[in-house]
Amino acid sequence: MEEVAVLAKIPVTIPFTQISFNIVITEIIVTSWIIMAVIILWAYLATRNMKLVPSKLQLSAEFIVDSINNFVKNIIGHKWKSYAPYLGTLILYLALSNTLGALFFAKPPTRDFSIPVALAVMTISIVIGSGIKTRGFGGFFKKLFKPFFFLFPINLMEYLIKPLSLCMRLFGNIFGAAILMHMLTKVAPIIVPPVACLYFDLFDGGLQAFVFFFLSTLYIAEEVEIEE
């Protein structure tokens, strides 16, 4: 594991207490802020002056939003509107984060373990919340005993395995690709890295973004589905 560059430490003291700590600003955090700023700016510029004859920027936004909405709707069903904003933001963030390796001066935020963990925790929280909202707390708890009561431990473990799987798959692929690209850059710094970048940083990065997005959508769909 490589050491994450620390850019700043902001001391914070909680008023009327002796509790103090540092807010650490790392390179990963700054890169994530930049990605979020790019997404927000793109969304604002694409929708601030919408016309019947759309500009290229508006057309790109409409295409991306329609594609995400249709995909989520086909998997989740009639309740898709509640989850499309989160899932759409998720894949946009991951698509930009995972492919940053194509820029040799930038490091993908998802190569740091904390980012995949945070995204996986967010997704599983929505999954559990969706199950409770759909069935009620009692119905959600009863589902853990189906189809047989002795499967309760296994059903419960699913809510630990799902985020762990999401996290490790994303982190492992992006971090592994970063290591391979670093090795190739040292061995053959001129010819090989630009070619390998097309696969490891663009294709594989985009693929892992879609896999995380698809599995998150699928897990939510499983919870909002009502058994007959």
Image: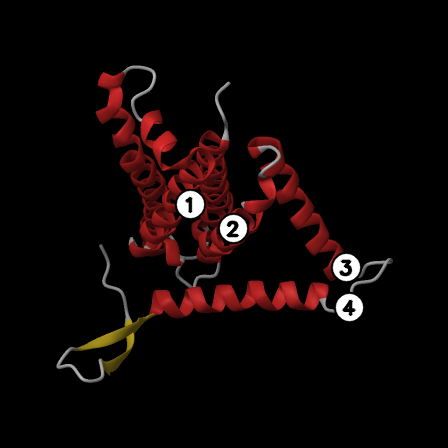
Front-lying residue, 188 or 5: 5
Q: CA distance from mark 1 to mark 2?
A: 9 Å
SS category of the residue bearing label 1? helix
Q: Are marks 1 and 2 in contact (CB under 8 Å)?
A: yes
Q: How many residues crowd around disc 2 within 10 Å: few (fewer than 14), some, or many (20 or more)? A: some
Q: CA distance from mark 2 to mark 3?
A: 24 Å
Q: Which residue is mark 4?
A: 49
Q: CA distance from mark 4 to mark 1?
A: 33 Å
> Horizontally, is 33 left or right of 6 in the view?
right
Q: Which residue is mark 3?
A: 56
Q: Is residue 160 above or below residue 105?
A: above
Furthest residue in direction left, as rendered: 18
Nearer the N terminus, badge 2 or badge 4? 4
Q: Nearer the viewer, mark 1 or mark 3?
A: 1
Q: Are marks 2 and 4 in contact (CB under 8 Å)?
A: no
Number of marks drawn: 4
Q: CA distance from mark 1 to mark 3?
A: 34 Å
Q: Which residue is mark 2?
A: 86
In the rendering, at what x and y percent does residue 126 appear? Answer: 42, 45
Q: Nearer the viewer, mark 4 or mark 3?
A: 4
Residue 48 occupies which quadrant of the picture? bottom right
SS category of the residue bearing label 2? helix
Q: Which residue is mark 1?
A: 126
